[in-house]
Image (cartoon, grey):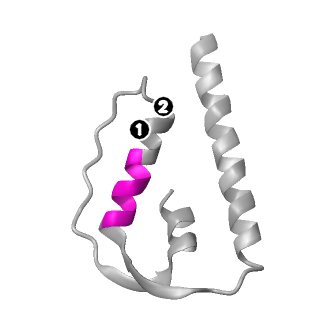
Amino acid sequence: MLYQLRQLTRGMALLVDELLNLSRARTIALKKEQVNLRELAGKIAEDLKRAEPERKVEFHIANLPEVEADEGLMRIALG
């Protein structure tokens, strides 16, 4: 029970951090560049695995297109 509560708390903290990142991103000028979404999603998956190595998860990332976007904002959206 305590473990589950700790996991839920950690998840809420990550959500709050991401919302704060998004609110800050609105004040920064967009930097459009070519972004490979599949590679970006793979990097995010690896970051998540490193952040919580005790969790055994498997990611299946579909073929995603390369787009013109702000990589930082795409990272927030996918993360």
Q: Is residue 44 magenta?
A: yes
Q: Position of residue 35 (x, y in %)?
A: 40, 78
In this rendered view, identify the residue nearer to me: 68 or 16: 68
The residue at which mark 2 appears reads as: 52
Q: In this view, does 70 lie to the left or right of 68?
A: right
Which quadrant: the N terminus?
A: top right
The residue at which mark 1 appears reads as: 49
Asked which secondary structure carries label 1, the reply is helix
Q: Do the residues labelled 2 and 1 touch (CB within 8 Å)?
A: yes
The residue depicted at 58 percent of the width and 86 percent of the height is 31
The residue depicted at 64 percent of the width and 21 percent of the height is 5
Q: What residue type is labelled 2?
A: Glu
Q: What residue type is labelled 1?
A: Lys
Q: Is residue 31 left or right of residue 48?
A: right
Please determine whether, in this image, residue 21 is positioned above or below residue 55: below
Chief secondary structure of the magenta portion: helix
Q: Quadrant of residue 2?
A: top right
Q: Does the magenta stretch include residue 20?
A: no
Q: Give the range drawn in magenta.
A: 39-46
Q: Is residue 69 left or right of residue 57?
A: right
> Badge 2, how many Cα within 10 Å: few under 14, some, many 20+?
few
Q: In which quarter of the image is residue 12?
A: top right
Q: Residue 26: which numbered mark, if any?
A: none
